[in-house]
Amino acid sequence: MQDTIKELISYKMFKELRKYLSYKEPEDIAAALNGLSHEDMILAYRLLPKEIASEVFINLDSDFQEKLINLFSDKELKEVVDELFDDEAVEIIEEMPSDVVDRILNQIDKEQRSTINRLLQYPEDSAGSMMTTEYMDLYENMTVADALDHIRKVGEDREDIYKGYVISKDKKLRGIVDAKELVLANGDTPIVDLMTENTIQIKTLDDQEEVGKLFGKYNETSLPVVDKDEHIVGIITLDDAIDVIKQEAEEDFEIMAAVTPNDETYMKTSPIKHAKNRIVWLLLLMISSAISGAIISKYETAFAAIPILVAFIPMIMDTGGNCGSQAATLIIRGLALDEIKTKDIIKVLWKELRVSLGVGLILAICNGVRIYIQYRDVSKPLMENLQLPIVVGITLILTAVMAKMLGGLLPILAKKLKLDPAIMASPLITTIVDSASVWAFFSVAVAIMNI
């Protein structure tokens, strides 16, 4: 699509370009425009049919949105703003500098401006900040015919008309009724006879990550948001929930890689900010790695007496890191999906203990056989040839047990302390296990080899 747009612009075939874009999905158009030069993007956007221009605008990068707003006349800006739902307007406003925000707010009527200001007051990562107030409200004294008339009258301005939220006079949520049930029911049927009373509700201050989990658990297309008095104040739709799930997954991925989360894309982030997001973790991990160096220095006489011991340090450390990473990844995933609770800590540790003993034993046997074959000296007695395989084998078992137990324990402790479990991922666990495995290796070597 991007190549076609460029070609049509280069030949000044603007009528054909407008017709071409009118048959494309707004999300696809936005993706294509985001990759164009500013001049071509602005030209192509101005050729968009009015009915899809706002939807394309919502999906553009914030930098392009800002440039377009600065180029818009007040009339053009109002045309775009009038098509935005409240949550979409809030999302755009949060990304814009103050002078652009003032222009946007000046084109919004007083009632909508009040709603947007209220939404902006909710904490950034709360349900209230991501909800829309444009839901399909139905009153409890309505019949099916009344409800359908109301939907026809105001439905165009509502973000979701497939669910009607039945409310009392004081706006307390009574229940939910599906549009399908309304269409199939008799016109004189009271809607309270059709509604579902036991509804899943979200509180305005609930964390957005918990909101995403509710959508995943119940497979809903929208969920109501209520205040502390259980008055409905808005809804959260599935598309917003998907954005949150994606955002949380990206944040966890960055934390697990020992990088401070960043809202900007990789290409938009400056090298200085990239370095700033990474250096703190690198410094912490480097300092903690110094512990391994101190342990190795302590046992300098051991590997001076038997230099071959040094050759096994990388293998043992890598094995520990890999074992810890495996366990931590599975536990973090389980916590994120609510498959594992903090109260399951004993069950998790017992399971990881059995797993670690199993894998540790297999690793010990495989490496023991390899080491014996590779390093045996036929001139020495059997027991002396078995010392090195035994030392490495016991160390591998101890390392697997420590690593997997830590990998299972630390994410749960982080969750219990209200921290993101992802912070206990591979880099941190690897650093801890490195020190522990080196200490175990030389302790076992000193004990068995009498050095």
Image: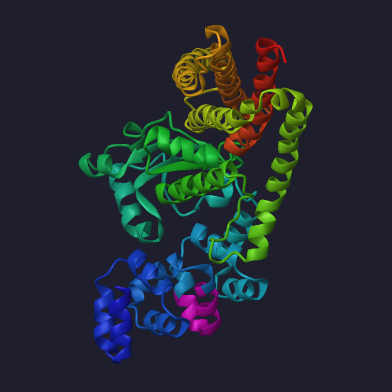
Across and down, in percent, residue 181 comes to 26, 39
Q: Residue at x 59, y 21 (%)?
A: 399
For residue 78: magenta? yes
Question: Taking the image as drawn, is residue 431 in sight?
Answer: yes
Query: In the rendered image of this protein, does residue 64 appear above or below residue 228?
Result: below
Across and down, in percent, residue 293 comes to 74, 34
Across and down, in percent, residue 449 comes to 66, 13
Q: Quadrant of the N terminus?
A: bottom left
The quarter of the picture where residue 195 lies is: top left
Q: Quadrant of the C terminus?
A: top right
In the rendered structure, the answer to whether residue 422 lies left or right of residue 287 reads left
In the rendered structure, the answer to whether residue 421 lies left or right of residue 139 reads right
In the rendered structure, the answer to whether residue 436 lies left or right of residue 372 reads right
Q: Nearer the viewer, residue 389 or 8?
A: 389
Query: In the rendered image of this protein, does residue 162 appear above or below residue 275?
Result: above
Residue interval drawn in magenta: 64-79
